[in-house]
Amino acid sequence: MPLIPIASRYDGKSALHLAAARGYDDLVEMLIHRGANPEARDADGKLPVDVANGEAISVLRRASAIERVHFARRYTQDLRGNPVTREDRYGIPQELINQFVSVAHFDFEKVKQLQRLCPTLVMTRATWDELAIEAAAHMGLRRWPNS
């Protein structure tokens, strides 16, 4: 599961929608660079460009030209391409750890379910060097009304 800034609020607005609506062109460009989808629609069916203001509009119009990066395998090899042996996996397959940290960005119920099955998961880091608690924290994960 790749790590990209795609989480959205209860109303379907992503970080990209919010940055675009506020006219934060530098943030819009950074989010796209990190993998945010400029074609994602909110609950009203609006694209980020539909709600954009100021210079954010021009950034979104050239979104296809913005370089994308992907860090999901950042710590799997050293500089020479040799596999990195992690000491913090506790015998858990790295793919499961990556999945656990990925879902921590958007699905608290799934995190709780996986943590009950394997309590040690909370102490593991994904290959992009992120803990599940960090993923949930930077996404502002919380329960929404009526959920």
Image: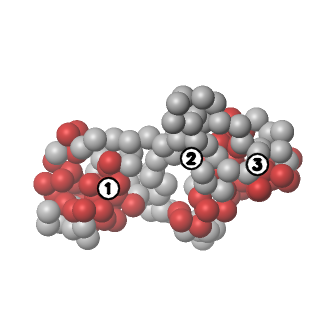
Please report the residue visible at 83 percent of the width from the left and 52 percent of the height from the top.
120
Q: Which residue is mark 1?
A: 30
| Upstream in sequence: badge 2 or badge 1 | 1
> For the residue labelled by badge 2, is the local secondary structure a helix, a strand or a loop?
loop
Distance of label 1 from label 3 (alpha carbons): 30 Å
Please report the residue visible at 51 percent of the width from the left and 45 percent of the height from the top.
3
Q: Amino acid at mark 1?
A: Met
The C terminus: image quadrant = bottom right
| Upstream in sequence: badge 2 or badge 3 | 3
Q: Position of residue 1 (x, y in %)?
A: 57, 38
Instruction: Please state which of the two labelled residues, at mark 1 or mark 3, is closer to the viewer.
Output: 3
Colouring: secondary structure
Q: Which residue is mark 3?
A: 88
Q: Amino acid at mark 2?
A: Trp
Please report the residue visible at 40 percent of the width from the left and 58 percent of the height from the top.
14
Disc 1 and disc 3 in contact, CB within 8 angstroms:
no
Distance of label 2 from label 1 (alpha carbons): 18 Å
Q: Residues within 10 Å of mark 2 (few under 14, many from 20)?
A: some
Residue 128: mark = 2
Instruction: Please state which of the two labelled residues, at mark 2 or mark 1, is closer to the viewer.
Output: 2
Q: Give the camera-side residue of 89 and 55.
A: 89
